[in-house]
Structure formats: structure tokens, C-alpha cells
Image: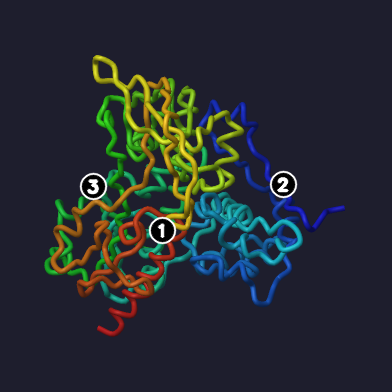
């Protein structure tokens, strides 16, 4: 008999096997497992889970359809709020959002909302279900800059309302961080990401790649010369941060962005691609977020012995618990309460090691986490050939620097209203990492939805 207090287990690749391949780690639910997990849902009238979802998916509604076995109906419910369900089902931090407030979780384990969303999205892909484009457009032209989660969501929502939307993407492939940032073993590109992008295109959205807004064309030109009535900036935050320690410019030091982009976009993980990447045999990843876990697990699969170096304790790791768990299972070593002070090089300027110091936690800082304090006399050296810095990112100032009247803050982030995405420049809206700095996929999607609402209100009033 099924224990309703326990989640239906999700099948995964064996850690020893997956550590040597780039196939997806989590294998997901089959139909029987999905229906069984859906049957655990309490169908709350005042569903807390919906309040915990940044894009407000009708979670009880789609789970009810899964329980009945009507997966197309479930897909239609999700499509009302999300353009990227297969992505969100895989990479959203559900444990701190919808599942974190699930009533079933009070006396047992919460419903596996993310895994059920993934199941519905995968079923839709396998059975050819996609949302339909509106019968006619309303004649208003909108430009969206960036094809990441924020831009795709904004474009999809506007297209459903009848707008003529064109996405301008700087790279040759669409998807932004979904395609170049998140590894294949967490988010398959050809099956999952490209299908979700195709579904947005089926809504009538036009795409132009290899367009660097700020160089190829400016926002002022889009508005004044190209006939666009509004612009949404969803260009992300792709400018990496570094520590500023000695040796940081050595050969063999990467930003996590560069390392993951080379691996994902340039197919370094495939034997039939000759991709220029010094993958490393002894690798340290500095940082403790999801990107750090992605870079470390990628380096492991490329044949390296990998250490995560993080200056706080495990309790303060900002990465998802699932990602930390998977990394440990796969054999990645965690050097916690440890901070680099110098990258050591050989006579040819290549990384040969890293000098670190042990830390202890002091009083809480502005973030609310206890501040790490160096322990005198605790310095030691790690023997390495590659260091990957995963310390966060900020927006590239190219767009803000070439747009008249666009206000930014001290972190070079575009200033925009949270509810509408409206910036200081009339007709220009923004959202996602370009506004907040590096955050999660689902928060970028929430900002994309807000931007679409803001643009719709602006053009309707106009």
C-alpha cells in the first residue's frame, strides 16, 4: 500500500556511471508514477503552492488533471502561466518555492511539484502538444532583447496577446543561459530547450540571431527607425566577477561562465567536437552556488579531480540541496571554510596551485549569513592546474551605455519597476538578471511576465 506521506521516488542514473557521461541525471516519472504522486495532493482550496510559484501556475489544477491521466489538459493549465515548463521542472528551486510551502509537507514530504511539471512537459513534447498562436495580431510591434528565460517568457506572453514580437539574440544559438550556462546533464539542449523555444516561435515570435544590441543596432534605433513601439531588455548578466587576488590572470584560470559556455555551446563534452578548452586534471571551483556546482560537475565529467572551495560552511551553501547532494555522490570534494588568497603559477605562467587560508564564522553580515573570518597561521597550498571562479556575474554595460535616458544603479543593473518592468526611458522595459543581477531561471521568467504586462498596459493606454 502506498504511503501518502512519502514522495514517489524518482529514478536517477547511478552516481558512478553518470560521473563519466553527460546524460541527464534524473530520469523522471513514468505515467504510473506521475499519477500516483499526483494522488498525494490534498487539492487545497487556498493553495499555498501557487503563492510560492513566481509565475503563479495553477498547481492544484494541473496536478488534478495528472491524477486523472488527462495529461493534455494538465499541459494546457501549465501553458496559461509558463512558456518553459520542461525547463522549470528541471532547474527551479522548488524546495524553497512551491514545494517549500506545500501543506502536505507539514506532516510528511511535500508533493514533487517540479517532477510532475517536468513529466507533463515531457509528455507534451513526446506527443506533439504545443500552445496555439492567436488567430490574428493587433498590429503593435515589440522588440525583445535576449532569448534567455526572461526574454522568451515576455515574448511568449506578448505573442499570446496578439503582439508582433521580434527577439534579438547576440549569439548564434537561442536560449541564453539555458543553452550556454546550464550543463547538458541537468538540462538537455536538443530535446528540452530547443523544443520549448520552438513552442515560443509557434506563437508567432520572430527571431534574429547574431545581433548585438548596442553595436549592431541600438535601442534608440529600434524605437525611432525600426518601427518598434516598445522594447523589453532581457539580456541577462554575463559579465563575470573575480576576487582580485594575485595570479588571477594566469593561464588556466576561467570564469565559470566561460568554462560552461565552452563546454555547452561549443560541445566540449562530445568526443566528435574539437573544442578549445583546457579542461584540467586537478580543478578547484571557487564558489558555492548552483553555477559553481554546474562547473564542478562538468569538470568532473571532463576527467578532472575536482574540489569546491567555499569560504563559509555547508549550511550557508547557496546552491540547491539536490545539486550539492548530486555533486557529493559523484565524488566532488568540498573544501569548506576555505578562501583563496593567491593563485600560484609556474615559469610559463600556467596555474600550478592555489594558496588558501582556513576560515571561521563570525557575526552575521548584511546578507544575514555569518561573516567568514580568516584564521591566522592556517594558510596551505593546493596543487592544481585549473581554477574556475564562480563568484557571480553582473550585466554587461553595453546596452545601458548606448541607450539615452536609461538609469542604472551602482552595480550597473538597469533600474526598473518590479511590477511592470518600466525603466526610466519611456517605452523601454527590462527584467531578469539585467535588473537584479544573477538570479534563478524562474525569477527571470517572473520578470518576463511582469514586463509583458507592463508593455501591454503601456501600449493599450497609448
Element carrying mark 1:
loop
* Front residue of 237 and 274: 237
Q: Is residue 445 left or right of residue 235?
A: right
| Drawn side of residue 261 relative to residue 403, left or right | right
Q: Secondary structure at mark 2?
A: loop
The location of residue 344, given as percent across then percent down, is 32, 23
Q: Nearer the viewer, residue 149 or 225?
A: 149
Question: What label does residue 9 carry, if any?
Answer: 2
Residue placed at 27% from the left, 75% from the top? Answer: 139
- Rate crowding at label 1 as few (under 14), some (14 to 19) or many (20 or more) other CA atoms within 10 Å: few
> Measured along the vertical axis of the image, is residue 354 above or below residue 242?
above
Position of 228 with respect to 234 (left or right) is: left
Residue bearing mark 1: 366
Whether residue 136 is visible, yes or no, is: no
Image coords of residue 48 (percent x, y): 62, 70
Q: Give me the residue at 54% from left, 49% from top.
A: 90
Q: What colouring style does the render use? A: rainbow
In the rendered image, the vertical position of residue 144 relative to residue 306, given as above or below? below
* Residue at mark 3 to residue at mark 1: CA–CA distance: 40 Å
Judged from this view, the residue extending furthest toward the right is 1
Q: Which residue is mark 3?
A: 210
In-image side of 349 versus 311 (left or right): left
Q: CA distance from mark 3 to mark 2?
A: 43 Å
Badge number at residue 151? none
Query: Which residue is at 70% across, 61% downward?
Result: 105
Dot 3 and dot 1 residues touching (CB under 8 Å) = no
Looking at the image, which residue sits at the far bottom?
461
The mark nearer the N terminus, 3 or 2, is 2
Considering depth in this image, is 208 or 391 the residue closer to the camera? 391
Question: On the rendered image, what quadrant is the C terminus found in?
Answer: bottom left
Amino acid at each position: 500500500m502506498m504511503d501518502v506521506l512519502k514522495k514517489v521516488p524518482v529514478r536517477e542514473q547511478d552516481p558512478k556511471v553518470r560521473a563519466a557521461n553527460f546524460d541527464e541525471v534524473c530520469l523522471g516519472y513514468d505515467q504510473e508514477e506521475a499519477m500516483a504522486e499526483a494522488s498525494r495532493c490534498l487539492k487545497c482550496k487556498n493553495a499555498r503552492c501557487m503563492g510560492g510559484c513566481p509565475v503563479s501556475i495553477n498547481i492544484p489544477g494541473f496536478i488534478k488533471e495528472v491524477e486523472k491521466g488527462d495529461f493534455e489538459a494538465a499541459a494546457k493549465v501549465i501553458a496559461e502561466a509558463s512558456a518553459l515548463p520542461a525547463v522549470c521542472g528541471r532547474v527551479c528551486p522548488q524546495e524553497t518555492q512551491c514545494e517549500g510551502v506545500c501543506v502536505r509537507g507539514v506532516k510528511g514530504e511535500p508533493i514533487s511539484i517540479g517532477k510532475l511539471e517536468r513529466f507533463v512537459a515531457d509528455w507534451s513534447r513526446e506527443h506533439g502538444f504545443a500552445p496555439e498562436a492567436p488567430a490574428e495580431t493587433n498590429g503593435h510591434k515589440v522588440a525583445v532583447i535576449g532569448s534567455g528565460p526572461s526574454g522568451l517568457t515576455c515574448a511568449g506572453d506578448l505573442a499570446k496577446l496578439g503582439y508582433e514580437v521580434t527577439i534579438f539574440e547576440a549569439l548564434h544559438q537561442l536560449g541564453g543561459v539555458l543553452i550556454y550556462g546550464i550543463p547538458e546533464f541537468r538540462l538537455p539542449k536538443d530535446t528540452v530547450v530547443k523544443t520549448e523555444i520552438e513552442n515560443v516561435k509557434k506563437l508567432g515570435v520572430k527571431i534574429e540571431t547574431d545581433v548585438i544590441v548596442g553595436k549592431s543596432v541600438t535601442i534608440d534605433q529600434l524605437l525611432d527607425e525600426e518601427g518598434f513601439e516598445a522594447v523589453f531588455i532581457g539580456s541577462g548578466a554575463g559579465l563575470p566577477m573575480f576576487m582580485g587576488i594575485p595570479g588571477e590572470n594566469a593561464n588556466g584560470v576561467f570564469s565559470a561562465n566561460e568554462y560552461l559556455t565552452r563546454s555547452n555551446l561549443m560541445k566540449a563534452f562530445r568526443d566528435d567536437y574539437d573544442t578549445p578548452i583546457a579542461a584540467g586534471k586537478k580543478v578547484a571551483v571557487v564558489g558555492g552556488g548552483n553555477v559553481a556546482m554546474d562547473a564542478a560537475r562538468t569538470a568532473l565529467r571532463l576527467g578532472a579531480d575536482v574540489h569546491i572551495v567555499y569560504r563559509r560552511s555547508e549550511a550557508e551553501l547557496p546552491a540547491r540541496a539536490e545539486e550539492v547532494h548530486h555533486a557529493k555522490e559523484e565524488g566532488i570534494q568540498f573544501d569548506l571554510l576555505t578562501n583563496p588568497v593567491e593563485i600560484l603559477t609556474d615559469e610559463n605562467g600556467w596555474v600550478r596551485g592555489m594558496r588558501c587560508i582556513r576560515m571561521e564564522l563570525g557575526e552575521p553580515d548584511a546578507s544575514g549569513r555569518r561573516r567568514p573570518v580568516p584564521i591566522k597561521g592556517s594558510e596551505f597550498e593546493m596543487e592544481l592546474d585549473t581554477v574556475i571562479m564562480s563568484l557571480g556575474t553582473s550585466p554587461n554595460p553595453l546596452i545601458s551605455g548606448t541607450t539615452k535616458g536609461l538609469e542604472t544603479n551602482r552595480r550597473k543593473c538597469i533600474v526598473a519597476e518590479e511590477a511592470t518592468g518600466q525603466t526610466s526611458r519611456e517605452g523601454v522595459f527590462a527584467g531578469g538578471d539585467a535588473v537584479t543581477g544573477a538570479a534563478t531561471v524562474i525569477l527571470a521568467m517572473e520578470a518576463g511576465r511582469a514586463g509583458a504586462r507592463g508593455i501591454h498596459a503601456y501600449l493599450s493606454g497609448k
